[in-house]
Image (cartoon, rainbow, N blue to C red):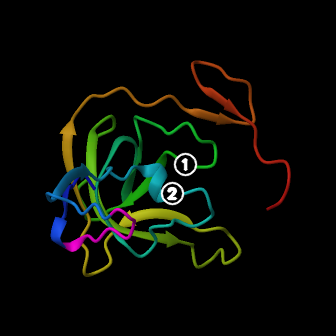
């Protein structure tokens, strides 16, 4: 993510198959920057992450909740798609340092799907953490930021929240 890529099409490596033959006179060079991954990309539109069992880097978010073993963060620039989530759990473990509520952070780590062993029929929860080879890290960008507006499911919109109805059928 956020990597500058340069592509060179070498003129001598291109052959024209049309008549009249018009071969390239010069090399063609172009560049592009890859898009940074966001939380909604990691969450995906399905029940499990398209990035499960992969390392991800530089994922931005605002810390919206702090737990004894991690923190929740939410994207401050949502994609506006109901099918994707803008929040994710960052699992630091009990001893891991945690940022403060309202901190803007970037997180790098391993994407996994967690299911409590005592609840084998529950859906999994996508989270970022460590896996042994990939160590979770977070970087403080700024502090004291406003929290993103909450999304209230199944109740009228109030206090600036967005109203979203829960699914009405089993999937």
Mark number, residue 74: none
Q: Which residue ends up furthest to the right in the rendered image?
A: 169
Q: Can residue 133 be seen in this view?
A: yes
Q: In which quarter of the image is residue 7?
A: bottom left
Image spot of residue 46 (x, y percent)? 62, 61
Q: Which residue ends up furthest to the front in the rendered image?
A: 20
Q: Quadrant of residue 15?
A: bottom left
Residue found at x 65% / y 20%: 158
Apparent side of residue 141 relative to residue 90 in the rendered image (left or right)? left
Foreground pick, 152 / 86: 86
Q: Which residue ends up furthest to the top in the rendered image?
A: 159
Image spot of residue 109 (x, y percent)? 30, 65
Apparent side of residue 166 relative to residue 7 in the rendered image (left or right)? right
User: Which mark sits nearer the N-terminus, 1 or 2?
Assistant: 2
Circle count: 2
Span highlighted in magenta in the image: 13-20
Apparent side of residue 165 relative to residue 141 in the rendered image (left or right)? right
The crowd level at tag 2 (other Cα within 10 Å; few <14, some 14-19, many 20+) is many
- Say if 138 sits above or below 103 in the image: below
Please check the rendered image and state whether residue 15 is part of the magenta-colored stretch, yes or no: yes
Q: Give the alpha-carbon distance from disc 1 to disc 2, as whole Å.
A: 6 Å
Q: Badges 1 and 2: C-beta atoms under 8 Å apart?
A: yes
If the image is split into quadrants, where does the C terminus sit? bottom right
Please check the rendered image and state whether residue 22 is part of the magenta-colored stretch, yes or no: no
- Say if 123 sits above or below 80 in the image: below
Element at label 1: loop
The residue to which callout 2 is attached is 43
- Say if 117 sits above or below 83 in the image: below
Q: In which quarter of the image is residue 57?
A: bottom left
The residue to which callout 1 is attached is 85
């Amino acid at each position: 993510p956020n990597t500058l890529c340069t592509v060179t099409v070498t003129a001598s490596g291109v052959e024209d198959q049309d008549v009249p033959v018009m071969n390239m006179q010069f090399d063609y060079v172009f560049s592009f920057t890859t898009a940074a991954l966001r939380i909604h990309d990691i969450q995906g539109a399905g029940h499990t992450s398209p990035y499960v069992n992969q390392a991800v880097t530089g994922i931005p978010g605002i810390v919206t909740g702090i737990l004894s073993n991690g923190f929740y963060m939410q994207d401050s620039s949502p994609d506006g798609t109901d099918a994707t989530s803008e929040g994710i759990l960052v699992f630091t473990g009990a001893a891991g340092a945690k940022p403060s509520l309202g901190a803007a952070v970037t997180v790098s780590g391993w994407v996994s799907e967690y299911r409590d062993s005592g609840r084998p029929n529950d859906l999994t929860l996508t989270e970022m953490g460590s896996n042994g080879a990939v160590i979770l890290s977070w970087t403080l960008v700024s502090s004291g930021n406003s929290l993103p507006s909450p999304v209230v499911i199944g109740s009228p919109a109030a206090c600036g929240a967005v109203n979203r109805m829960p699914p009405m059928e089993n999937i």
